[in-house]
Image (tube, grey):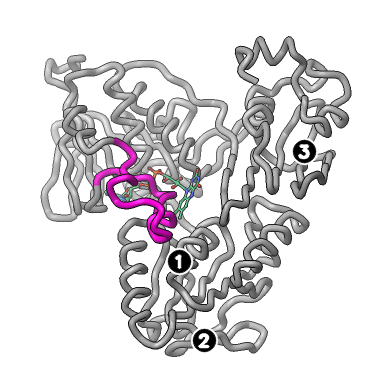
Amino acid sequence: MISVNGDIKKYVIIGNGTAAAGCIEGIRKNDANGDITVISEEKHHVYSRPLISYYLEGKTDTERMLYRGADFYEKNGCKVYYGVKASGITSAVDGNGYTVALSDGRSIKAEKICVCTGSRPFVPPFEGLGSVVNKFSFMTLDDALGLEKALNELSEGVKKPSVLIVGAGLIGLKCAEGIYEKAGKITVCDLADRVLSSILDAENASIVEGKLRERRIDFLLGNSVKKFSAGEALMNDGSIVKFDVLVLAVGVRANSEIVKNAGGNVNRGIIVDTRMRTSLPDVYAAGDCAEGYDSSIGSNRVLAILPNAYMQGFTAGVNISGGDAVFDNAIPMNSIGFFGFHIMTAGSYDDVCFCENRDGAVRKFFVKDGLLKGFMLIGSEERAGIYTSLIREKVPLDSVSSDFAHNIASNYIFSAEIRRKRLGGAV
Ligand SMILES: Cc1cc2nc3c(=O)[nH]c(=O)nc-3n(C[C@H](O)[C@H](O)[C@H](O)COP(=O)(O)OP(=O)(O)OC[C@H]3O[C@@H](n4cnc5c(N)ncnc54)[C@H](O)[C@@H]3O)c2cc1C
């Protein structure tokens, strides 16, 4: 595809994660020749971020963590700047597109930009944090490599190092699982009164907590660190936790500044429409940095999950290169495993709840206005795909098999006819 000024189109993708990979593939759907430049702060080929805990467990290695094959950029004709940050975007002086400033002092021209900068760990200003020597976040492959090195080095002493993880959300708990074999005592604390508080209710959270406690992971909930001093944390309740290694997994913040500083609209993330356009002309955004449409609530919010990052990136790529794609059925979804115990959640937890407790699994379904709005499946992922389609496609429950509660209990939500029609007889 040739741009208006007769040149090959110049795309710049800022960031090099899943959303960026989706964007490259979206562009190449329409434009085989456009010039794609990727600015990658991390020095790594695109990898699957959720696998960093599996890396620590020894279940994968850096080669198998690649999100796309080693020849991905070459095959797609992309130039990648590794270990460089885009520090700002400004309208080009000649009025044609943008200039992207890089942290190493260089700058590059862009006609179209897709911002795929993800998020960064939020680190609260804990008193005494500076005195902690071995402290880590748990977001990147380099975090995992650094944590592994510290645990290995400390293990050369008499005993395995004890670890304090601040944050009992997905990232903190995946870290606990990842370091389980390498660490001695693991303590996880959180100001919230339960684990995975953003996706689980108290009942289900306590089941998950119990499963982790069985693995000698200790929890201090409704409690957090008041003050650090070398090797110990004074907790809000006055207790003291001694540790060799600290992991901070308190939360994340969208990397949205690049658009904000250029005058674009930003809230908790970069505000995008269902075509991933920002408020700046020819600037798109995708993934964890973006606040896109969530069909489960009918408004925008950051949905920091991998499938969303890919779909947003792909949609942006198609549109940025002259095609027309809309991504308007995103919903929150989480599929997580801890030591083989599975949790799947999706949608919102509105209105009437149908609950079933069977065979060691708890299934909760939330129904509003005749539609399935959300679910929590604890200890089972059975038929999660079907339930997710019901939410995503807003299928009226009276169009599926007769009594919903009965059908939930018997796990046959779809009538045979609907199953054939909607799922091609796949179930
Ligand atoms: C431990 C962990 C476990 C997870 N588990 C799951 C899971 O089970 N399921 C799930 O769906 N999701 C999971 N996630 C979330 C998922 O990994 C993210 O939603 C996804 O990786 C987001 O992709 P992204 O491309 O938007 O951002 P990222 O993958 O974060 O990529 C953004 C990249 O942009 C770079 N960057 C930032 N600013 C700049 C700049 N100015 N210039 C150049 N480069 C820049 C960053 O360094 C980064 O490399 C997990 C995340 C973590 C940390």
Residue at image position (61%, 18%) is 426
Residue at image position (20%, 34%) is 71
- Quote the CA–CA distance across marks 2 and 1: 17 Å
Mark 2 or mark 1: name the one nearer the start of the chain. Answer: 1
Identify residue for label 2.
Answer: 242
Residue at image position (75%, 58%) is 202
What is the magenta segment's predominant secondary structure? loop
Identify residue for label 3.
Answer: 365
Rendered position, 76 above or below 233: above
Q: Residues within 10 Å of mark 2 (few under 14, many from 20)?
A: some
Name which residue type carries label 3: Phe
Mark 3 or mark 2: name the one nearer the start of the chain. Answer: 2
Whole-percent x and y of residue 377? 70, 43
Q: Quick check: is the Cβ at mark 3 less than 8 Å away from ligand 1?
A: no
For residue 59, side relative to residue 373 (left or right) = left
User: On residue 179, which mark appears?
Assistant: 1
Q: Secondary structure at mark 3?
A: strand
Q: Secondary structure at mark 1?
A: helix
Q: Residues within 10 Å of mark 1 (few under 14, many from 20)?
A: many
**Closer mark to the observer between disc 1 and disc 3:** 1
